[in-house]
Image (cartoon, helix red, strand yellow):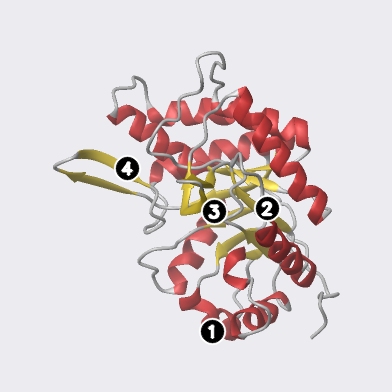
Amino acid sequence: MPDSLSHGFAAPAGAVGIGWRHPHYRELLERRPPLGFVEVHSENFFAEGGAALATLEQARAHYAVSLHGVGLSLGSVLGIDAWHLDQLERLVRRVEPVRVSDHASFGRGLFKGAVVHAADLLPIPFSRASLDVLCANVQQVQDRLKRRFMVENISSYVFCKPLPNDPPLAEPEFLSTLARRTGCSLLVDVNNIYVNALNAQLGGAEGDPVQHCLRWLDAIAPAEVAEIHLAGHCHVSDEHGDIVIDDHGSRVCPEVWRIYQHALARFGPVPTLIEWDTAIPALDVLLDEAAHAGALMPAGVTP
């Protein structure tokens, strides 16, 4: 197998895909359902050779592939881990994905003088100082990959307060400024926006969470958005209180579908992904969710 696949597939406007996870590897390849693209977590395919990479290359022969990372730690003041970026570049050259992305978060930091990784998507403050760090790291990734990169908004459960002399920005302004300064694209996760709005309401914020999400979307320029994510979430109540978790473990709820329709009206037929990462159901459930997203695309667009 050559280092890079020369037969390319492009995901057109209006393409709808699913997150392709291990329980569905074989079935997807055997059935080959009509999908605009499949998306995988980049880090699962960093190994040189092996069954996982061979399986991804089989899928690449039939589908456009989007690489979605969870470990670049784009918001870390320590910068980008050189080994991680090396592996990502090698995978990009081999797979020739339609899009490559990661999150506006951090995971790497110093603890007792040693570099540690939290193995999580930790929130960053929406401040000018944090923006400078994020822009520098995103630019480094784009320069190395020689392509436009996508950055996703995250669901967060704690608030990172900026320093007193660095007043906070609204999240849409923060992300839009990132896109303008670096030329990157935004991956808008509609479910994440809604989860954060629900948790803000649980914390005492006033107003309708759905309306908050619509205003969030209206603050983003359409040209900045390259992909949309949809997923399910869950409500957790225990002795510590109530919280909404972005667990990617259920169907998209009606409120998120409503917000998604507004996103399509605002941004146009942006490629859309159905994510499902916990309690993974039968493949047909994901395909049904993808069909629903496709049915909401503007008239004349073929998912």
Q: Quadrant of the C terminus?
A: bottom right
Horizontal and vertical percent for residue 181?
76, 31
Of the two numbered discs 1 and 3 on the same chain, state the one appearing first in sequence.
1
- For the residue pair 111 and 303, the one nearer the viewer reads as 111
Q: Position of residue 209 (x, y in %)?
A: 39, 29
Q: Pointer 4: residues within 10 angstroms few (<14), some, or many (20+)?
A: many
Q: Which residue is mark 2?
A: 14
Kind of residue at disc 3: Ala
Cα separation, mark 1 vs mark 2, equals: 26 Å
Amino acid type at image mark 2: Gly
Q: Position of residue 260 (x, y in %)?
A: 53, 42
Distance of label 2 from label 3 (alpha carbons): 9 Å
- Residue located 52% across and 82% down the image: 27
Please say if the residues under marks 2 and 3 sit with CB atoms less than 8 Å apart: no
Mark 1 vs mark 4: in front: 4
Q: Is residue 41 visible?
A: no
* Circle 3 residue: 293
Label 3's element? helix
Question: Which label sits in the foreground, 2 or 4?
Answer: 4
Which of the two discs, 2 and 4, labels the residue nearer the N terminus?
A: 2
The answer to whether the residue labelled 1 contacts the one labelled 2, judged by CB atoms less than 8 Å apart, is no
Residue nearer the viewer, 210 or 133: 133
Q: Determine the secondary structure under disc 1.
A: helix
* Secondary structure state at the residue bearing disc 4: strand
- In the rendering, which numbered label is found on residue 26? 1
| x then y, percent, for residue 288 | 48, 64
Mark 1 in CB contact with mark 3 (< 8 angstroms): no
